[in-house]
């Protein structure tokens, strides 16, 4: 089944103008989701809005958004006022300028979308633009009205396909100073750094997302299957008790174990060549 575009419009900028569609690059379809159910009747529980003081039910027509002030009162904002603030969309992803790939702080990346040509007539221009980005190691900074909001985007090529990633605004990203406030200046132990560096080199690998499982979601699915089949519920393994260990000794032990595994994994031919 061909996926449906979440948004269709045009990509416009220096040297490019073509129809495009945005497709979600993320999915939550495989995640286990629950409803709230009445234990006694087995019926689904409905959420209802009530007045926090009177506890009386509030009908939809009487519900209005409010911004809370310091004194606890609210500034009420009617739905039509909010609607008037929604920016009008011209269905255009407008490229403003280009950046080096390394200039974009990944902390600001929000949601990724696949960007594809709208139809066959747009494919040549679209592919030419993507190839140019890849050959010049650049990304395009763009702006658009998407899903009723002004959005800043980075358009880039990733593994042969075009991605348009929405960006967090500066006010949405917290300063690291808040998290690291009060920490003292580091005084590094060179021996520890050497041991840690050796351990890292021995554990080097390549990133493959297929290697990582959502163990919590898998446990939920197994729980649901067991309930459906009338089996005993799987028991969670107890967490092993963690002991306080000396960091230096722990790093030395890990480095020795990694070296031993590396030597054990060598073929006889490799050992002979090394000995010679």
Image (cartoon, rainbow, N blue to C red):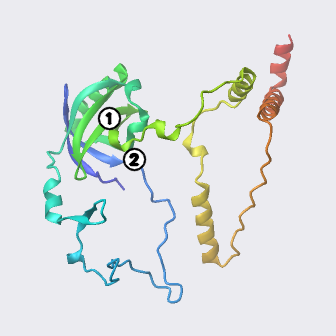
Residue tagged 2? 25
Do residues under tags 2 and 1 come within 8 Å of each other at their CB atoms?
no
Q: Residues within 10 Å of mark 2 (few under 14, many from 20)?
A: few
Q: Quadrant of residue 272?
A: top right
Residue at the (64%, 73%) spot, across then down: 226
Whichever of labels 2 and 1 marks the residue nearer the N terminus, that label is 2
| Location of residue 202 with respect to 37 vertically, above or below | above
Give the secondary structure at mark 2.
loop
**Position of residue 181 measured from the top left corner of the image (x, y, whole percent):** 52, 37
Q: In front: 145, or 84?
A: 84
The label shown at residue 194 is none
Q: In front: 92, or 120?
A: 92
Residue lying furthest front in this view?
71
Q: In front: 35, or 116?
A: 35
Q: Quadrant of residue 141?
A: top left
Residue at the (47%, 76%) spot, across then down: 36
Query: Which is in the foreground here, disc 2 or disc 1?
Result: 1
The label shown at residue 154 is 1
Give the secondary structure at mark 1.
strand
């Amino acid at each position: 089944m061909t996926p449906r575009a979440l948004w269709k419009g045009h990509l416009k900028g220096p040297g490019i103008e073509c129809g495009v569609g945005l497709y979600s690059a993320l999915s939550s379809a495989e995640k286990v989701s629950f409803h709230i159910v009445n234990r006694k009747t087995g019926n689904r529980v409905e959420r209802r809005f009530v007045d926090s003081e009177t506890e009386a039910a509030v009908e939809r027509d009487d519900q209005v958004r409010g911004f809370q002030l310091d004194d606890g009162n609210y500034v009420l904002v009617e739905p039509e006022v909010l609607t008037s603030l929604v920016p009008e969309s011209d269905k255009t992803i407008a490229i403003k300028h280009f950046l080096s790939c390394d200039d974009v702080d990944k902390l600001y990346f929000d949601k990724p979308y696949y960007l594809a040509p709208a139809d066959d007539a747009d494919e040549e221009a679209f592919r030419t633009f993507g190839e140019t980005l890849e050959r010049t190691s650049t990304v395009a900074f763009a702006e658009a009205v998407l899903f009723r909001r002004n959005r800043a985007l980075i358009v880039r090529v990733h593994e042969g396909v075009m991605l348009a990633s929405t960006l967090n605004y500066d006010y949405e990203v917290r300063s690291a100073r808040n998290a690291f406030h009060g920490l003292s200046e580091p005084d590094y132990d060179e021996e520890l750094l050497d041991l840690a560096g050796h351990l890292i080199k021995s554990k080097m690998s390549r990133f493959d997302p297929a290697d990582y499982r959502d163990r919590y979601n898998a446990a939920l699915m197994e729980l649901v299957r067991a309930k459906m089949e009338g089996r005993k519920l799987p028991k969670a393994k107890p967490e092993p008790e963690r002991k306080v260990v000396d960091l230096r000794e722990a790093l030395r032990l890990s480095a020795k174990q990694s070296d031993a595994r590396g030597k054990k994994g060598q073929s006889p031919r490799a050992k002979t060549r090394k000995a010679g």
